[in-house]
Image (cartoon, helix red, strand yellow):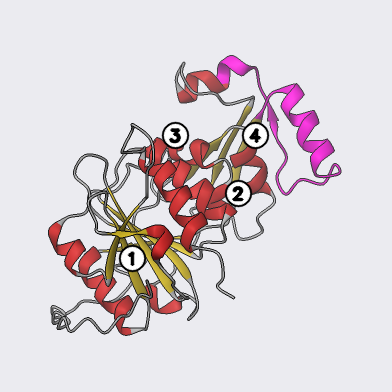
Amino acid sequence: MTVRRNDGRPASPRRPGFRPGGRPGGPRPEAGPGEGVTVLYGWHPVAQALGNAARGLHRLLATENAAARLAEEFGGSLRIAPELVRPSEIGRLLGPDAVHQGLYLEAEPLPAPGLDELPADALLLALDQITDPHNVGAIVRTAAAFGVAGIVTTVRHAPGATGVLAKSASGGLEHVPFVTVRNLAEALIALGERGFTRIGLDSDAPASLDTLTVARPLVIVLGAEGKGLRERTRSCCDVLARIPFSGAIRSLNVSNAAAITLYALGRPQA
C-alpha cells in the first residue's frame, strides 16, 4: 500500500497568532531545581551532556569513583570540574529511588527549534498527550537510535519536567530536540503543508505497517496508552496504521510500539 497525501480533506484554518513551533523556549522535558536549570543524573545522561558543546553547564557533583570514570572517558579534560561528594549527598538532592550512579549535573536547557527550523527531509515523532516520563524517556532513547530529527509535543499534557525522563532517555536528550507547540493538530496541519506525510499509530486501523510505502519527510504520531490518538489528531493524519500482531497479546507499551514503528517506517526507502 502506497501512502498518498491527497486525501481530499480540507486543511483547517489556523487560528490568529498561531506560529508553528509554539512559544520559543517552551517547557523542557528535563528537571531543574530552579527556572532555567536542568538536572541530569546517572552515567549516560551526564556523560552525554558533558560531551555536548551546546549544553551549558553549571555544577557537577560526582563521587570519587564516578569522577575517575569521567576522567578516563574524557581523557582528563572535562568542561567543568566536579565537586567530590559522597553518594548520600546526591541521594539527598534526588531522593532515595534515583539511580544516580554517583553523578549529578545542573545544566542549561538545550535550545528548542521551531517547526520551521526542522530539515525538509526530516523524520519526526509527535506525541499526543503521552505524559509518563519513563515512556517518553524510552521513546527519546529509541528516537536517537533511529536518527529522529525532533519530537513534537505540546505545552500542556506533556511529561512533567523531571530528571526521570532524562535518565530513561539514557543520553538521548542530547541528540533529539523537543519541539514544543501549543496545539498538536495545528502543528500537524503545518507539517502537512510542508509536505510531511503524517502516519498515526492506531491499534484498530485497517492498514498494517508492513503494507505501507512511505518517504521522508515523515512524522509518526503516537497516542497515550489506553486513550490512543484523540479524534482531532486522527483527523490530521494522512493514514492510520497498526502493528500487525500475530500472538495472543494485541497491544504494547507505547515506547515499544514507537520502536517497532520507527524500524518499520523510519528506514530510508531505496
Residue at 63% across, 39% down? 44
Say which amino acid is labelled 1. Answer: Ile
**Who is closer to the viewer here, 137 or 26?**
137
Residue carrying label 4? 43
Q: Residues within 10 Å of mark 1 (few under 14, many from 20)?
A: many
Mark pair 2, 3: CA separation: 19 Å
What segment carries the magenta color? 62-89
Disc nearer the start of the sequence (1/4): 4
Mark pair 1, 4: CA separation: 35 Å
Say which amino acid is labelled 3. Answer: Val
Disc nearer the start of the sequence (2/1): 2
Please tell me whether mark 2 sits on a helix, a strand or a loop. Answer: strand
Foreground mark, 3 or 1?
1
Mark pair 4, 2: CA separation: 16 Å
Please tell me whether mark 4 sits on a helix, a strand or a loop. Answer: helix
Disc nearer the start of the sequence (4/2): 4
Q: Are marks 2 and 1 in contact (CB under 8 Å)?
A: no
Say which amino acid is labelled 2. Answer: Leu
Foreground mark, 2 or 1?
1
Residue 47, can we see it?
A: yes
Q: Quick check: is 214 in the magenta stretch?
A: no
Q: Which mark is residue 19?
A: none
Say which amino acid is labelled 4. Answer: Trp
Residue at 52% across, 55% down? 263
Please tell me whether mark 1 sits on a helix, a strand or a loop. Answer: strand
Looking at the image, residue 97 sits to the left or right of residue 180; the answer is right
Residue carrying label 1? 199
Give the image location of residue 129, x and y in percent: 25, 49
With respect to residue 84, does 201 lie above or below? below
